[in-house]
Image: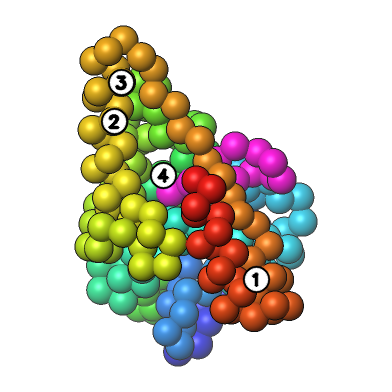
């Protein structure tokens, strides 16, 4: 299938729009970006339009939370190949060291004058992501439920390598623990530890030593 091309006037009109949206075409089993509006440029923090187009086609999820990438990428492909409606929420980081914000994306298919099917997706910034139930708004709650539902696919209770609770079991433990703490007048807290640099460590020392490091770190926890 050939790439659909807008006229110069129509492209300039769509690209100048202040509403955050993009128009895509599914070509050769992949999603290709045809239009990025000025509103979406501003939302994602781009000043270079050529760079924005490059990233959208080659590394669309570079600033998306790693835990959300598989879910939203799968939803995008299903929308491109079979779905008539697209809606998803995910976490996106705007700049180094920034907090994750929740992005709400909704899309619909439409046909051009010569019958080519395209998709338009609108994006909305729904605010800072938080995992704290007391601070969660509608979109935080929906996102946490989506993450919980996804984790249920991983049915084992403990990770075979580290011996730590699996994500599924962690949610069960965390929910029960939070209820107990709050019932006793306490305030639950979440401590996140990130063991970074594992790819470099495995490359230098081998995967066996990497497994040993993970097990040693899990014992400290």
Q: Nearer the viewer, mark 2 or mark 4?
A: 2
Q: Quadrant of residue 109?
A: bottom left
Q: Which residue is mark 4?
A: 104
Q: Check whether the beta carbons of the residues at disc 2 and disc 3 lie within 8 A of each other.
A: yes
Spatial separation of the CA atoms under disc 4 and disc 3: 32 Å
Residues shaded magenta? 90-100
Expressed as whole percent of the image width and height from the top left, the position of residue 167 reads 34, 53
Q: Which residue is mark 1?
A: 199
Q: Earlier in the sequence, mark 2 or mark 4?
A: 4
Q: Secondary structure at mark 4?
A: strand
Q: Check whether the beta carbons of the residues at disc 1 and disc 4 lie within 8 A of each other.
A: no
| Residue located at (35% from left, 20% from top) | 134
Labelled disc at residue 181? 3
Vertical position of residue 71 compared to residue 114: above or below: above
Which is more toward the observer, 172 or 205?
A: 205
Q: Check whether the beta carbons of the residues at disc 2 and disc 4 lie within 8 A of each other.
A: no
| Residue located at (26% from left, 57% from top) | 157
Q: Earlier in the sequence, mark 4 or mark 3?
A: 4
């Amino acid at each position: 299938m050939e790439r659909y091309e807008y006229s110069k006037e129509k492209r300039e009109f769509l690209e100048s729009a202040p509403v955050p949206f993009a128009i895509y075409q599914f070509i050769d089993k992949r999603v290709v970006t045809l239009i990025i509006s000025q509103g979406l440029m501003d939302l994602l923090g781009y000043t270079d339009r050529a760079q924005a187009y490059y990233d959208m086609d080659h590394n669309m999820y570079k600033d998306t939370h790693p835990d959300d990438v598989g879910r939203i990428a799968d939803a995008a492909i299903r929308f491109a190949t079979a779905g008539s409606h697209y809606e998803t929420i995910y976490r996106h980081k705007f700049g180094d060291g920034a907090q994750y914000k929740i992005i709400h994306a909704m899309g619909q298919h439409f046909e051009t004058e010569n019958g080519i099917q395209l998709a338009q997706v609108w994006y909305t910034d729904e605010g800072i992501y938080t995992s704290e139930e007391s601070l969660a708004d509608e979109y935080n709650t929906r996102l946490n439920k989506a993450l919980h539902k996804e984790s249920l696919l991983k049915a084992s209770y403990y990770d075979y390598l580290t011996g730590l609770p699996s994500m599924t079991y962690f949610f069960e433990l965390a929910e029960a623990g939070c209820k107990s703490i709050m019932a006793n007048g306490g305030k639950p807290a979440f401590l996140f530890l990130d063991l970074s640099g594992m790819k470099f460590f495995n490359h230098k020392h081998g995967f066996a030593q990497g497994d040993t490091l993970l097990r040693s770190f899990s014992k400290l926890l």
